[in-house]
Amino acid sequence: MRLIKEGGFFIFPLLLCSVVGFAIIIERLIVYRKIMKQPLILWDRPDDIVARLRRHLVTLHTIITISPMLGLLGTVTGLMKSFYLLGIKTVSYNPQEISLGISEALITTAVGLVIAVVATVFYNYFNAVLESYVDAYNAAITALEDE
């Protein structure tokens, strides 16, 4: 709760990214586990299966791309807040007020990077598993053609 309070405005889109990313990861894990129990060559419409396995990966990649940018925007606004407070209070300023802007900057940066790192791990996992699944299908088709 403290992160939300101290994260500033850009913590909210970051939270949305994390919730959507988490939902996609869980949904993809379930779908991949269900579909990949059976080899691709045994499915009636393998192209539909591959399309189903690719679903939502673009959204996950978008989350990977925008999360660090949103974190950076939070960094910029947090630092702007700190410099603004330094500028208007040139004679005396409260270090606690200044540190809140710096805290906002660091929190949003960290949250954006954590979201991107976790999403990247799963995105790469899903792509690697999908590629392996399709490669096995292509090898099976080649073997059937050679007979």
Image (cartoon, rainbow, N blue to C red):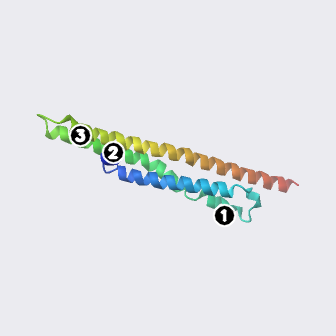
Does the residue at mark 1 contact the one at mark 2 (Cβ under 8 Å)?
no
Residue 9 or 140: which is nearer the viewer?
9
Q: CA distance from mark 3 to mark 1?
A: 53 Å
In this view, 25 is above or below 104: below
Going from N to C along the chain, the mark reached first, 1 or 2, is 2
Residue 106 or 48: which is nearer the viewer?
106
Q: Tell me what residue is drawn at x 45 percent, y 42 percent.
A: 114
Q: Tell me what residue is drawn at x 29 percent, y 45 percent.
A: 77
Marks 1 and 2: which is nearer the front? 2
Q: Quadrant of the C terminus?
A: bottom right
Q: Secondary structure at mark 3?
A: helix
Q: Is residue 46 left or right of residue 25?
A: right
The residue carrying mark 2 is 2
Q: Within 10 Å of the Cα at label 1, are there few (<14), some (14-19), or many (20+) other Cα atoms? A: few
Q: Which mark is residue 48?
A: 1
Q: Residue placed farthest to the bottom in the image?
A: 44
Q: Is residue 59 left or right of residue 107?
A: right
What amino acid is found at the position of numbered circle 2 in the picture?
Arg
Q: Residue placed farthest to the left in the image?
A: 91
What amino acid is found at the position of numbered circle 1 in the picture?
Asp
In this view, 139 is above or below 106: below
Going from N to C along the chain, the mark reached first, 2 or 3, is 2
What amino acid is found at the position of numbered circle 3 in the picture?
Ser
The residue carrying mark 3 is 82
Marks 2 and 3: which is nearer the front? 2
